[in-house]
Image: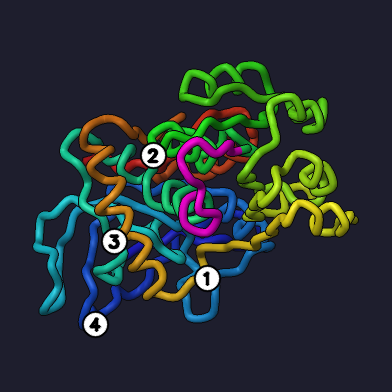
Amino acid sequence: MRGLQAEGGALVWQEQAAETLQPGQVRVKVMAAGLNRADLLQKAGMYPPPAGVTSVLGLECAGQVVEVAEGTRWKVGDRVCALLAGGGMADEVVVDERHLLTVPANLDWAEAAAIPEVFSTAWLNIFELANARPGEKVLIHAGASGVGTAAIQLCKAQGNPCWVTVGSQEKLDACIKLGAEGGVLRQGGIAALADQGPFDVVLDPVGANYAADHLDLLAVDGRWVLIGLMGGREATLDLGKMLVKRARLIGSTLRTRDAGFKATLLADMEQRLMPLFAKGDLHPLVAKTFAFEDAEAAFAELASDKIVGKVILLREA
């Protein structure tokens, strides 16, 4: 089978032997795969896969079950989407059965592939680690991204007013349409959000550039969840403000979590979120789709930072 890998900053399809199923695993024919910032970083040689994980790109995919190991709950023909540490941009992928979700009948393959990574990231960090309670205010940076658009919808569904930072008025308008209360353009700095705060939870993929301002924007007992470093890794913080506000800074990554952690997270999502997708209360936002053979163009589209939502690689049926 073929898998998409990064070599010297370029994307290359490599032939490789199909994996043998182990107990508790499922083989999925990949019909669509979502692109994420992590894929851009891996392509650039800046984010190697965890030890023991395939070098094939792709942290999420959707497809059809074609083989199951004995004792799994899935059957051949099931429509599923998968959360992965790698390997989604391939003809097929072998997955821990606990890392699959049933695709609701109202979603197509591209929409299904836009669920696992971004909705699990948003759910984990805002509602599990930060424990956002109904009515608490949430600040979401990069609000028009895949994670951002997922987070806005989850906040709306859970009764949490949210605000965003984005790079253009067009993106801000799109976020408000999704359910955000408002926001600011990042070019003007995030201190302009002071009138909308203080915020109980901050979802931050930026890091250093915004760090000092967060201490002014956070509410007492506020939770600041750091999930990325797009704005740098070194910052100076006034620890006195953190102390007085009883603020919590939580570092969080998902890709390197162990299989059991991910299984528990997806089981919670299956119970609490998937019914909302089936009813249309949540909807994965697909910005553009590209054929698998046009992966370079898809990566360029994501890197351009002009889209709202997700870029998806889609296989012809």
Q: Which mark is residue 256?
A: 1
Q: Which residue is mark 3?
A: 267
Q: Nearer the viewer, mark 3 or mark 4?
A: 3
Residue 111 sits in quarter: top left
Q: Position of residue 150 (x, y in %)?
A: 46, 39
The answer to whether residue 52 is visible is yes
**Segment colored magenta:** 127-138
Q: Please, what is the three-letter code of the amino acid marked with disc 4?
A: Gln
- Separation (CA) of disc 4 from disc 1: 21 Å
All told, the count of numbered labels is 4
Identified by mark 3, the residue type is Ala
Identify the residue shown where x is 58% and y is 55%.
38
Q: Which mark is residue 3?
A: none
Asked if the residue at tag 2 contacts the one at tag 4, i.e. Cβ–Cβ closer than 8 Å, the answer is: no
SS type, badge 4: loop
Report the residue at 86% width, 59% height from top. Answer: 239
Residue at 77 percent across and 44 percent down: it is 214
Relative depth, front residue between 140 and 229? 140
Q: Disc 1 on helix, strand or loop?
A: loop
On screen, residue 201 versus residue 52, left or right, reads right
Looking at the rendered structure, the secondary structure element under dot 3 is: helix
- Mark 3: few/some/many CA within 10 Å (<14, 14-19, 20+): some
Mark 3 or 2 closer to N-term? 3
Q: At 49% across and 40% down in the image, what residue appears? A: 151
Q: How far is disc 3 from disc 4 in space, using C-alphas?
A: 21 Å
Identify the image quadrant of the N terminus: bottom left
Labelled pair 3, 2 in contact (Cβ < 8 Å): no
Residue 167: image x %, image y %? 69, 27
Above or below, 188 against 313 in this view is above
Residue 150 visible? The answer is no
